[in-house]
Amino acid sequence: MDNDRKADSVELSIHKILVPVAFADAGKGDHRHLLHQAAWLARRFHAEIILLHVVPPLSYPAGVFESGHEITARDLHAHIIQRAQEDLDRALLPEFDGIAVTRLLLRGDPAREIGETARNRSVDLIVMPTHGHGAFYRLLLGSVTAKVLHETQCPVWTGAHLEEAPPAEFSVRRVLCAVELNLHNRHTVSRAAAMATAVDASLTLVHITGSVEVYGPGGPRVDPIWKDKIVGFAAEEIAALQQELGTNAEVIIDSGNVPELLNRAAAKTKADILVIGHIPGRSHLGDNGNGYGIIRRSVIPVLSL
């Protein structure tokens, strides 16, 4: 990693990784990629994986088996739980071979149970997909993931378009960190640098300023003086931050649409993971909507700290 020293002596420790699973989707698209990434992280950090499946309450009074025999709601729910337990007991054995795995089956609201499990079990990281399987769901975050991102303070590793990634062996060799010029910069960059150090990866910092276009006769145009001032200020702020933290990362500064330009920076640097920050006590999705847009549109996994 191209750093003079570990960023401000921050070290990244991951002891417990919570992986919520839905068995119907576990082998599909981004679910498969995320499970593979969770296994890589667990091996790299010698962490325990907590495999969690939540059975939601039934929303109808009774059901019918394929044989046509009617059953009560209680019997049906018991049957669903039994099947879920059997699936959980044998879930993903080859993928997590050699990793300490705890399997949990809970009943209730999935988002709430995920958040409470993260808190009660002192989880260091939640790894979960953004949505269910299918093309329609690429347009939005799934409701469970959105609630987890909105309500939990635990770091979340997720991805929306990972089914488009090549099937190569996953590893983190290059870390891209989105820097916003706010009071939380120090936390985000120091932990992104710690992640890069922990996995022997390079670190690139990227800051996207607001648009520098001005509108007048003939349509929009870039004001070079205004652009130089904005970019110059951002460069000075990031340089001061790096000096404070003892990092020497490459810096990319661009102006315009944040999710689009972060994807461009990811392609340019061949990044394996995008790190974004959130202000403690507030949503991972961001007050201004940037977090939602970044996570929904990123072509690489996103680690929200």
Image (cartoon, rainbow, N blue to C red):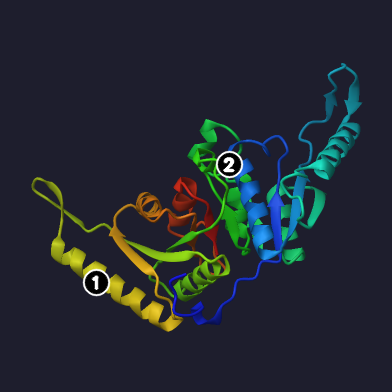
217 or 180: nearer the viewer: 180
Q: Closer to the N terminus: mark 1 or mark 2?
A: 2
Label 1 Cα neighbours within 10 Å, binned few <14 / some 14-19 / many ≥20: few
The spot of residue 8 in percent (x, y) is 51, 81
Residue at 38 percent across and 70 percent down: it is 181
The spot of residue 138 in percent (x, y) is 51, 38
Q: Is residue 63 left or right of residue 145?
A: right
Residue at 33 percent across and 52 percent down: it is 257
Label 2 amino acid? Asp
Is 110 situated above or below 175? above
Residue wearing tag 1: 232
Q: Is residue 85 left or right of residue 147?
A: right
Dot label at residue 252: none
Label 2 Cα neighbours within 10 Å, binned few <14 / some 14-19 / many ≥20: many
Q: Is residue 98 left or right of residue 202?
A: right
Is 137 situated above or below 296? above
Which residue is the extreme one toward the left?
Answer: 217
Q: Is residue 286 visible?
A: no
The spot of residue 233 in percent (x, y) is 27, 73
94 or 291: nearer the viewer: 94
Label 1 amino acid? Gly
Q: Is residue 261 visible?
A: yes
SS at circle 1: helix
Dot label at residue 30: 2
Residue at 60 percent across and 44 percent down: it is 33
